[in-house]
Structure formats: C-alpha cells, structure tokens
C-alpha cells in the first residue's frame, strides 16, 4: 500500500469514474468499494462512499463527497506513453463522452480531471545533447494539442 494516494472528489460518480479509469490502463483494478453506512451528505445508506482503485500500479481513492467541486489544472495526472499508438488510445479514451482537449498534450476528461498524455521520447528530446534541437521540439510542442511524436522528433532533428 502506498503511503500517499491521490483522492478524487466526485458527486455520485466515484464508482463510474474509477471503472472508466481502470479500463484505460494496464495494471489497473478496483480494489474496494465502501458504502455509506448511514444517510449523509455523501448519499443515502448503501450508496457508494469510497472506491479504492489502482491505476497503472498507483493507488487512488475516489470519494463521493456529496456536492460538485471543480478540479483545477494546477493538479494533473501525467501518463508516460511508449509510442504514438498509446498516446492516441489514451487521448481518445479520456476525451470520450465529454472530455475536452486543451493544449500541449493536456486534456480534461468528462469528470473535469486534468491529464497530460506525454510520449516518453518528448522528455528525452528536451534533455538531449542538442540544445537547439530541444528548443525546436519545445516550440513544436507549444503549437500542438495532442502530441505528435514524429513531428516532435522532426523538429528536434531540424527538419
């Protein structure tokens, strides 16, 4: 068990959201669903209060807090992607049913949670030995919504 685990606040959608997230990433599962023992601001007795879940090996908790509290992009979840196919799959999945693309690999899912869908190669390009190439890759990224590995690599290479 992790000592620190993010807790996501929902207004009745904790179980739905947790199931959605675990469907997108390997090494993910619902670990435990805890129900309200009494009627409370979080819901009626017997309704879902807390969902503990693991997302890509990281523990999370989803809480039905009883009212909507908006998320801010000041906190986001970065997903490290091995290739463009993984970028595309996660991008499309998280945008489904009401998500919104933002910029520079960022999006907001249908619950308002901010995500960064980042190919592993991008951080390597930024930290690569060619400083001018890193600057070109960064400039290219600033013009993108969903990150495009081939275009980032091309910019780094000067093409």
Image (cartoon, grey):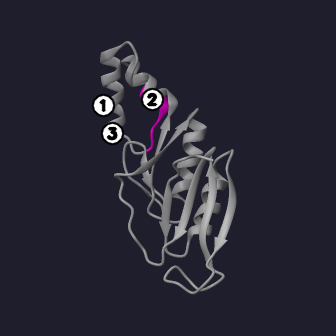
Q: Residue 19, located in which quarter of the rendered image?
A: bottom right
Is disc 3 placed on a helix, strand or loop?
Answer: loop
Q: Is residue 73 above or below residue 51?
A: above
Pinpoint residue 65: horizontal percent, then vertical percent.
Answer: 48, 73
Q: Is there any visible trace of residue 110 in the rendered image? A: no
Side of 141 relative to 40 (left or right): left
Residue shown at the point (57%, 54%) measured from the top left: 60
Single out the mark in the foreground, 1 or 2. 2
What's the distance in space between the residues labelled 2 and 3, CA to CA?
A: 14 Å
Q: Mark 2 or mark 3: which comes first in sequence?
A: 2
Residue designated by label 1: 139
C-alpha span from label 3 to label 1: 7 Å
On the image, the x and y values in percent for residue 111 come to 48, 65
Q: Is residue 55 left or right of residue 41?
A: right
Quadrant holding the C terminus: top left
**Percent position (x, y) of residue 29?**
69, 54
Q: Are marks 3 and 1 in contact (CB under 8 Å)?
A: yes
Question: Is 5 located above or below residue 151 in the figure?
Answer: below
Q: Which residue is mark 2?
A: 122
What's the mark number on residue 69? none
On the question of residue 42 being in view, the answer is: yes
Q: Residue at x 49, y 75 (%)?
A: 11
On the image, numbered disc 3 is attached to which residue? 143
Q: Report the residue at 58% width, 32% height from top.
A: 82
Q: For mark 1, give the secondary structure.
A: helix
Q: Is residue 56 inside the magenta stretch?
A: no
Residue contact between numbered discs 1 and 2, judged by CB atoms under 8 Å: no
Q: Closest to the observer: 130 or 61?
A: 61
């Amino acid at each position: 068990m992790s000592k620190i685990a993010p807790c996501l606040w929902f207004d009745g959608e904790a179980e739905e959201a947790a199931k959605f997230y675990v469907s997108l990433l390997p090494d993910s599962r619902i670990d435990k669903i805890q129900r309200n023992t009494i009627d409370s601001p979080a819901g009626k007795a017997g309704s879902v209060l807390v969902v503990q879940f693991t997302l890509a090996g990281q523990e999370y908790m989803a809480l039905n807090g009883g009212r909507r509290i908006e998320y801010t992009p000041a906190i986001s979840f970065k997903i490290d992607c091995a290739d463009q196919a993984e970028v595309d799959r996660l991008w499309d999945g998280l945008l489904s049913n009401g998500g919104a693309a933002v910029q520079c690999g960022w999006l907001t899912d249908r619950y308002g949670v901010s995500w960064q869908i980042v190919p592993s190669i991008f951080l390597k390009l930024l930290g690569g030995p060619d400083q001018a190439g890193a600057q070109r890759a960064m400039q290219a990224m600033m013009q993108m919504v969903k990150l495009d590995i081939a275009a980032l690599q091309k910019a780094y290479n000067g093409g």
